[in-house]
Image (cartoon, grey):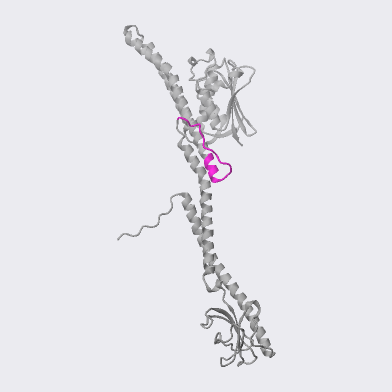
Amino acid sequence: MSLPRAAPWPRSIRGQVTLLALVLAGLFLVPLGLAADMVIRGAVATSIWRETREAASQIVVAYRNTTLRNPIAPGPGGVDVIQVVGPGGHLLAATAEAGGVPPLSEVRPDLPDRFVDFTTCPRSFGECFHVTATLAGARPGSPVVYAAKHTPAVLSTRVLDVAVGLQIMALTGLIGWIAWKGADRGLRTVDNIQAELAHITVSDLSRRVQEPPGEDEISNLARTVNSTLARLEHSVEQQRRFAADASHELRTPIAGLRAQLEEARLHPDDTDLVSLVDGALRDTDRVEAIITDLLFMARLGSSGPAVQECVDLGHLAAEEIARRPAQVPVITDFQEDVVVLGVRTQLFRVIGNLLDNARRHAAGMIKVEVSGSHRTAVLAVTNDGDRIAEKDRERVFHRFARLDESRSRDRGGTGLGLAIARDVAIAHGGTLHVEDVPEGTRFVLRLPMIE
């Protein structure tokens, strides 16, 4: 025997929010409606019995003052059913409506000046009454005064219950509609984001989703999506530039290597094997250097954050200078305790690239300075070679940029060293620029300093 399937829970957020709102509204409004029904019924009954007690009190006063007349005039508040009944059930006096019929009830108070409130539905009247009974005289055997008022429909029927129920249903439905519209309004933006994302492909990552105003969760989601798209676009652009740069720069040494090998194949007897191998090794070294730099730039642009540590910039520069051959004299001027937060291997690469660039273009001297002030660490590498024109001081950081014949590739560079140094500086929250000096060229690296 299979168990009955549970009612399906709405899959959409709109349905879930609406259902939750309906459930919460029901849990709140149903008890509230029941309490309101009870309060209304109690208030109406209290008002009726207040009026019947007042009418009964007036009859007691008239009876004790011997001014009671028959028939009795209706009491205040519409109390038009009044009877004064003797000990044997004999009707002594009554209003016009209550005369000629049996007593309303056999209820008899035990003591004078005590009121007994109750409801009754005598057959002789064919309807229900709210009744107050009290003794007319001061003795226990005195006649009984019954002052009654017709029970209103709000108490004798289900009119009040139906009205309260309808109001609960209307309010619950209104709350559900408001919840649906509110969820729909909020999720419409999500639907728009989803539709816009569906049209974004790798061929055009420049598109962005619309960011709604405000600081709510959906606005934050749109901003996060756009930020992610921007990072993705940057990463894809890095990969595209990597492929373009690699194909462009590797073509020359590979073509040179191929030409040498084809020449040796065509003219093996005229080929100097040592020269051939030396040329092939130079081209291979060139290819290896370019590939190494390109891979470093690709990892720097697309990999996640590397582990950072506190690095003394002066000590790092001293280590890098010490491990390099002293082809050109290097003058140092290091301030103590210039500490930055960064990736040690990447900062090594920056200093090494700046030193390589200075060594290739220096006439006879290189100067390296490290200083720190105003929470900024500064590393400056100056060479006494040719100056860089002001218009070219940004272009020199482009990939494979060459300014003139004096800075050609045959001097040992791959054309990527300064581009790598600039990328590492930016990744560390710093800058790398060419600054004015009286003679030569000065590269200045600035990084946030730890004090």
* Residue 100 falls in image quadrant: bottom right
Inspect the magenta stretch and tell me whether residue 210 lies in it: yes
* Residue 441 falls in image quadrant: top right
Give 372 or 417, whichever is nearer the viewer: 417
Which range is magenta? 203-223
Give coordinates of residue 353: x percent, y percent. 52, 24
Give coordinates of residue 302: x percent, y percent. 47, 32
Magenta stretch, overall SS: loop
Give coordinates of residue 224: x percent, y percent. 52, 40
In this rendering, the count of numbered labels is 0
Residue 399 seen by the camera:
yes
Give coordinates of residue 141: x percent, y percent. 60, 93
Quadrant location, the C terminus: top right
Q: Residue at x 35, y 10 (%)?
A: 263
> Considering only vertical position in the picture, is 252 above or below 349?
above
* Relative side of 47 to 11, left or right: right
Q: Residue at x 66, y 78 (%)?
A: 76
Residue 320 seen by the camera:
no
Q: Which residue lies furthest to the left in this view?
A: 1
Quadrant location, the N terminus: bottom left
* Relative side of 40 to 292, left or right: right
Give 182 or 400, whichever is nearer the viewer: 182
Give 298 or 225, whichever is nearer the viewer: 225
Inspect the magenta stretch and tell me whether residue 318 lies in it: no
Give 241 or 349, whichever is nearer the viewer: 241
> Considering only vertical position in the picture, is 114 above or below 177?
below
